[in-house]
Image (cartoon, helix red, strand yellow):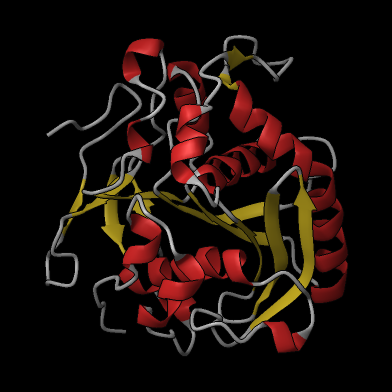
Amino acid sequence: MVARALRSPSLLLLVLQPCAGAASTPKLRGNVAATPVMSITNSSQLTSYDEDTTRHSLNLAEASYCVDSTASSAWTCATCDDGITVDSVVEADGGRALVGYDSGQSALFVAYRGSSDIQNWIDNIDAFFTAPYNELSDVKVEAGFWDEYSSLSGGVKEALASAAAAHGTHDVVITGHSSGGSCATLLAFDIARGATDLTGFSVKSVITFGSPRVGNSEFVSAHAGYGLNSVRVTHYHDIVPHVPEEFMGYRHVVSEVWYAEDYDAAGSYTICNDSVDGEDDS
């Protein structure tokens, strides 16, 4: 499959108009699982990257803004790829997650919607740590992101259990944009560590778009330690990945793929040299 550049600025720019801008996103056809999203070394360095799979996740993330029903008639947006079955729409406290089955990847999926008002969301970031993992007392995450994730967690877990029974698989692909990216990161971490009601599930991939920093350096190390098939896509014009700031103790999870301004051009992305020891600031 020939890799093509991402063509959906609406999810990678600070100003979001996802449903209105969705028409600019090409629909992805066929089996997108033919090429691995990435491969990693023991140092968690990203060594390969597949744009087609990433674009498919981008389409799922964008669809989460537009689709609010499991009815097949609702799956008609410009980024609503073929082969997707939406089994559940989980909503709580302004957040939303789509849960269902992706036949192209032979896996369940969870797609988290981000905030519809980015500037208001940035202005109201708590920037306070919480330590929610009893067995990992040094691992801390931003309290507001944890609250958003937790408000959806019960419904997402129930939806995953139902979808697993219906589709005969426990493999999960996870995606999300902006604050939804933080939820995607936290869900992948919970599945990897075998959290309650998530045992038996396996993360096939987690691909986020414009995600903020989620936790401290201990969280980054623990996240990398599970060897998750993880890609964190960022864009030159997006402020969200810069918050909460590093001087407050926050760090990004690996591995970042950064898109330049001219992201339609060949070679317009950079696989960053980040690791558990620090972010690539070049």
Residue shown at 32%/55% (left/top)? 13
Q: Is residue 199 above or below residue 27?
A: above
Query: Looking at the rendering, in which quadrant would you find the N terminus?
Result: bottom left
Residue ID at (85%, 43%): 197
- Residue 249: name its quadrant: top left
Residue 251 lies, with reference to residue 154, above or below; the image says above
Q: Residue at position x 86%, y 74% from top?
A: 166
Give the number of callouts: 0
Quadrant of the snapshot with the C terminus: top left
Q: Quadrant of residue 154?
A: top right
Left or right placement of residue 260 versus residue 72 in this view: left
Task: Classify residue 192 as left or right of residue 39.
Answer: right
Q: Is residue 165 above or below residue 85?
A: above
Of residue 262 and residue 102, the one placed in the foreground of this image is: 262
What x and y, as percent, mark residue 53? 42, 70
- From the viewer's perspective, tell me whether residue 233 is left or right of residue 166: left
